[in-house]
Amino acid sequence: MKTRITDMFGIQHPIIQGGMHFVGFAELAAAVSNAGGLGIITGLTQRTPELLANEIRRCREMTDKPFGVNLTFLPTVSSPDYPGYIQAIIDGGIKAVETAGNNPQKWLPALHEAGVKVIHKCTSVRHSLKAQSIGCDAVSVDGFECGGHPGEDDVPNFILLPRAADELKIPFVASGGMADGRSLVAALSLGAEGINMGTRFIATKEAPVHENVKQAIVAASELDTRLVMRPLRNTERVLRNGAVDRLLEKERTLGASLKFEDIIDEVAGVYPKIMLEGTMDAGAWSCGMVAGLIHDVPSVKDLIDRIMAEADDIIRQRLMGFVNA
Ligand SMILES: Cc1cc2nc3c(=O)[nH]c(=O)nc-3n(C[C@H](O)[C@H](O)[C@H](O)COP(=O)(O)O)c2cc1C
């Protein structure tokens, strides 16, 4: 399948693996790239630019295909060394960067000068147009269904994607709720030129996370996610668990007076405990509604091959069958 996204990133299939804290290590990024998609290392999971440089080197040992790095500009307790991370990306020969969170404008000249293509993740048409106007090369349009931070507008992909298609000139991928060939064909129909998946890629053999995380996703239905931190305007879609219930109770009790410090036990520093140790109730962790469509833990290659074969079949058999009837 050939789209502006496959051309831009030099990949075989229009499938991107979104950055994921404590999931997007070299093993997963390399597996996705080896299977013909675009794997992405999560920059901030590496505590320093030196560690990111090392992770890029490790990934390069596992694949000779293109892969990218995610750099998230979110409100964090202490500001990371962004100039250092940008330098590590450039020095590491990375040609694709997924940015997310705050406006990446400041970093675009250096990245573009180094020949890096920047895809910015946006949860609204407004932000997508802004990304286009500052010179981003592509957008990852992240609907309300998505795992992680869906923003505050709550527009699902069935509306958001065609709205983006009506307004954007640069190519975009559909992010949030994508799981299979049906998702890919639907996304293409709505104007996207590929898909970005997070949650689906966690439940794969190569995802370097604890088995408990994969099984929690397989066991979950589309009803099992919750939105947390909405009162702080930092909404995150997470899988419901004991910690999330406690967090939501605090949000209800404290109302408008809620501060980040009130929920620090449920959200700060919890990812290593969950992803690496498998302590599933250690805190709130991002997960999409798409969990309801995930029933197995295939290899990344089997997953991507299955998506592409299913998409091909839907286009050639099902859809063509309707118009030729
Ligand atoms: C466990 C987890 C961690 C994530 N961490 C990040 C992150 O650090 N930076 C980021 O830009 N997006 C992050 N995301 C969002 C994903 O990159 C992607 O946009 C999202 O998962 C798409 O929705 P889906 O889960 O329905 O596929 C995370 C998602 C998950 C599930």
Image (cartoon, rainbow, N blue to C red):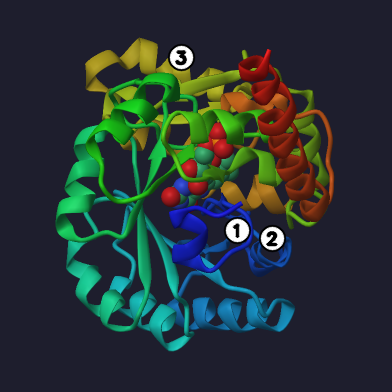
The image position of residue 238, as x and y in percent, is 54, 29
Q: In the rendered view, does 135 fall on the left or right side of 154?
A: left
* Element on which disc 1 rests: loop
Tell me if label 1 and label 2 are in contact, CB under 8 Å. yes
**Image-quadrant location for residue 58:** bottom right
Q: Which residue is the site of mark 3? A: 249
The image position of residue 147, as x and y in percent, is 52, 34
User: Looking at the picture, does residue 159 appear above or below residue 304?
Assistant: above
Three-letter amino acid code at the position of disc 1 = Gly
Q: Tell me the distance, in whole angstroms, between the alpha carbons under discs 1 and 2.
A: 6 Å
Q: Residue at x 44, y 20 (%)?
A: 158
Graded by Cα atoms within 10 Å as few (under 14), some (14 to 19) or many (20 or more), the crowding at tag 1 reads many
Q: Residue at x 42, y 39 (%)?
A: 264
Q: Which residue is the site of mark 2? A: 28
Q: Tell me the distance, in whole angstroms, between the alpha carbons under discs 1 and 3.
A: 31 Å
User: CB at mark 1 closer than 8 A to ligand 1?
Assistant: yes
Q: Which residue is the site of mark 1? A: 24
